[in-house]
Amino acid sequence: MDEAFVKEQDRRRKKRLPDEIYDQTGWSLPLAFDVECVGTGALTGETRPYAPGAVAEEKGLAAAKVAWLLPWGSGTAAAVAEAVQAGLKVRVAEGGLRLGGRAFPAGTAIVRVAENPDAARETLGRIARKHGAEAVAADSGYVEEGVSLGSGRVHLVEKPRVLLAWDRPTSSTSAGWARWVLERRFGQPVTAVRVSSLGRVDLSRYDVLVLPSGEYGEALGEGAVKRLRDWVTAGGTLVALGEASRWLTREKVGLLDTRTELRDGRPEAEPARDEKKEAEKPPAKDKDGKPEPFDLEKAIQPERERPDAVPGAILRVALDPEHWLSAGTDGEIQAIVEGRRVFTPVKLDKGTNVGVYAKKDSVVESGLVWDDVRDLLAQKAFLMHQPAGEGHVIAFAEDPNYRGYAEATELLFMNAVLLGPAY
């Protein structure tokens, strides 16, 4: 976008007029897929038409005496989702380990020979090939360092029973993206239920509840919120996306112990509280004690206003490498941001800020972000985890399944769905 166009959009936003930006401003498949690329100049040399040769015979999975280890990633997540549906017992290591001279990162999936059927080798081999997941055979269980294969730090991945909120008040796009990612991209079965019917659903029959972006205030009353809280405390995993995460912070809901922020950084609280305080404030005076001159521009600014929306940009997110939700990453990803939600980070005694936006000088990877919005977003929470009893509340500030192609953040979403019940 040229400078004059951007300047005009800045003028319009300051007058609270809608912008004229079409779609989103940040595009990059390498960033969306978290693929590191190296730029290069013109390539020279001899070229020839590509002609695929004979398809090499697929090699079977190597035999293992103890287990097969699958380093975590998108392919492994899809393979594990199918493997547990096929009846295999799969575990994940909460920390890294070294076995047979090779380092395996935290989140590595482990399929033990002793606790799986004789056909496990064939079944796992077929599934791993299908999803492009690496499966390494281990003939010894004695790790050189890190998490032991038989310790309590290796968690069983149950076959998750996933419930997805559907229909009003969910965003149809957010709900559709989530369902596509679950069912089509990762092969995870899901039950969709209308929000209006959630009160009649036996939540104990499900391990995970996904709330797509939406404002649930009118649809889910006090009784429904209590049922959700009791279900989470008993061991359920609640995964909220975008506006659903904002709803969790409401005082009457109280499922996420943080707040969203206003344009000036103040907490977005119930309006009645701050309106009363503002009404009690004495008029501003100068150093001589006289009333300050009237400032029209200042006077017309709203007392309580949410931040300007980010018109679809890609922002850098730093991840906590010690948390299981970041499994399969190198500690940093890029997220597509298209909203006006700014979450104050969760306090240490309440939960974990698994993902936070980078510092303001490096937070924007691609696209347009207004300077004041960039300053407000820097180092604020993108992905939050709050334990509750035996269960989990997992909240994304933005929709990790954006249009079904945001591979990097989709992995974080699947980590919540697959690994939440395991922890």
Image (spheres, rainbow, N blue to C red):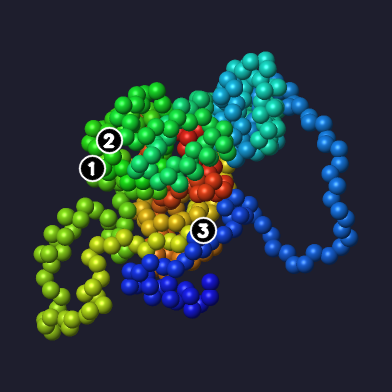
| Amino acid type, residue under disc 1 in the picture | Lys
State which tag comes first along the sequence, 1 or 3.
1
The location of residue 63, given as percent across then percent down, is: 74, 23
**Residue 269 visible in the shown view:** yes
- Label 3 and label 2: CA atoms lie apart by 33 Å
Q: Nearer the viewer, residue 362 or 241?
A: 241
Asked whether, in this view, residue 318 is left or right of residue 46, the answer is left
Q: Which residue is mark 1?
A: 252
Asked if the residue under mark 1 is in contact with the one under mark 2, i.e. CB atoms within 8 Å, the reply is yes
The picture quadrant where one finds residue 295 is bottom left
The picture quadrant where one finds residue 206 is top left
The location of residue 155, given as percent across then percent down, is: 51, 28
**Residue name at image x 34 percent, y 43 percent:** 169
| Amino acid type, residue under disc 3 in the picture | Ile
State which tag comes first along the sequence, 2 or 1.
2
Image quarter hosting the C terminus: top left
The picture quadrant where one finds residue 207 is top left
Reply above or below: 6 against 170.
below
Q: Nearer the viewer, residue 214 or 324?
A: 214
Q: Which residue is mark 3?
A: 314
**Residue name at image x 61 percent, y 32 percent:** 79
Q: How many marks?
A: 3
Reply above or below: 117 against 407.
above
| Amino acid type, residue under disc 2 in the picture | Val
The location of residue 219, given as percent across then percent down, is: 28, 39
**Residue 389 visible in the shown view:** no
Q: Which residue is mark 2?
A: 225
State which tag comes first along the sequence, 3 or 2.
2
Asked whether, in this view, residue 357 is left or right of residue 186, the answer is left
- Label 2 and label 1: CA atoms lie apart by 9 Å
Asked whether, in this view, residue 298 is left or right of residue 59, the answer is left
**Residue name at image x 49 percent, y 43 percent:** 177
